[in-house]
Amino acid sequence: MMLSELLRLRGIDPRTHKIKVIRHEDRRVDLHKFTRKELEIYQSHQSRPVFDGLDYVVSFIGANRGLGVMVGVYRVKTPKGVRPPKLAISNRALKRTTHTRYYYDLRRDNRFKDWEDRVVIKWTGAYVQWQQRLPPDKPVVQVLPKGRREPFHQYNDVLLSFDDLCRIVSSPDANADWHTALSSTAGVYLIVDKRSGRLYVGSASGKKGILGRWVQYARNGHGSNVKLKHLLAMHPNRQKEFQYFILQTLSRSLSRSEVIAVEQAFKKKLGKLACSLNTK
């Protein structure tokens, strides 16, 4: 199947609409670590008028072997010359890669929401050309299972939003590689509240490893931690601002006390002020 065929199924015809297909890949920053909101800000700000005169932009993020995974389909709403809105951006990488000479109000088309993060295309034509007209067409090489997150790469690369974590936990078949990797190791992890910058350092051990502990966070946001529980009581849905990292993997054969000793060492290195979401 070709991309144009998928678009026509939901009412967008490349023969009558002006469309560009874009594939995000930036050597300056790992775009896979951006949240969806951050990625949408990134693509709305351009240094050149690449989206002028278009009806739609079909957005993908680069994957291995010249593939692209669908971010979404966006209607181009901004008339030429509109000033970009003032945005409070905390992500330094996003600030560094955002150009505001040309701003486009790209409205997400919810008709394609169930295809986001699932439709995989082969990036044909000039590989270095990140934005291309449609036609020429792009072959769809795979439609990933519903609930699929991007493939697991390595532990050092793990950076999950709360929504990512919930998606992985709730769709074990679609994310079998994540379940295998996270349940295969004990370790020390970090939770960052992006709103305040405060940190929580925790550890996981036992048969289910890190996955067993993170499932608890996906269920209620706080995992029964006292300060996280208090934070969510004061600010409902604050877990939407949480990000999850792995600081160090450890053998599951280690005792709980041995794992906690490594956790305490990380808390000491980071300091009490940074680890303010940990209880004393």
Image (cartoon, helix red, strand yellow):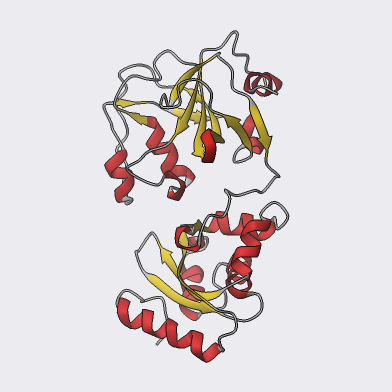
- Taking depth in this image into account, of 64 and 157 the one nearest to the observer is 64
> Looking at the image, is 185 positioned above or below residue 264?
above
The image shows residue 199 at horizontal and vertical percentages of 39, 71
Horizontal and vertical percent for residue 189? 47, 71
Residue 92 shown left or right of residue 204 in the figure: left
Quadrant for the C terminus, please: bottom left
Outermost residue, right direction? 173
Question: How many discs appear?
Answer: 0
Residue 13 vertical position relative to residue 70 in the rendered view, above or below:
above
Residue 187 visible here: yes
Q: Is residue 272 visible?
A: no
Q: Quadrant of the N terminus?
A: top right
Residue drawn at x 44%, y 88% as measured from the top left: 261
State left or right for residue 48 relative to residue 246. Answer: left
Q: Which quadrant of the structure image shows residue 268?
A: bottom left
Percent position (x, y) of residue 109?
57, 29
Residue 163 percent location from the top left of the image: 56, 54
Q: Is residue 167 left or right of residue 260?
A: right
217 or 210: nearer the eye?
210
In the image, is residue 139 above or below residue 245?
above
Looking at the image, the residue that sits furthest to the top is 16
Q: Measuring 29% from the left and 38% from the top, which residue is drawn there?
A: 86
Of the pair 192 and 138, the residue shown nearer to us: 138
Q: Seen from this angle, which residue lies furthest front?
A: 65
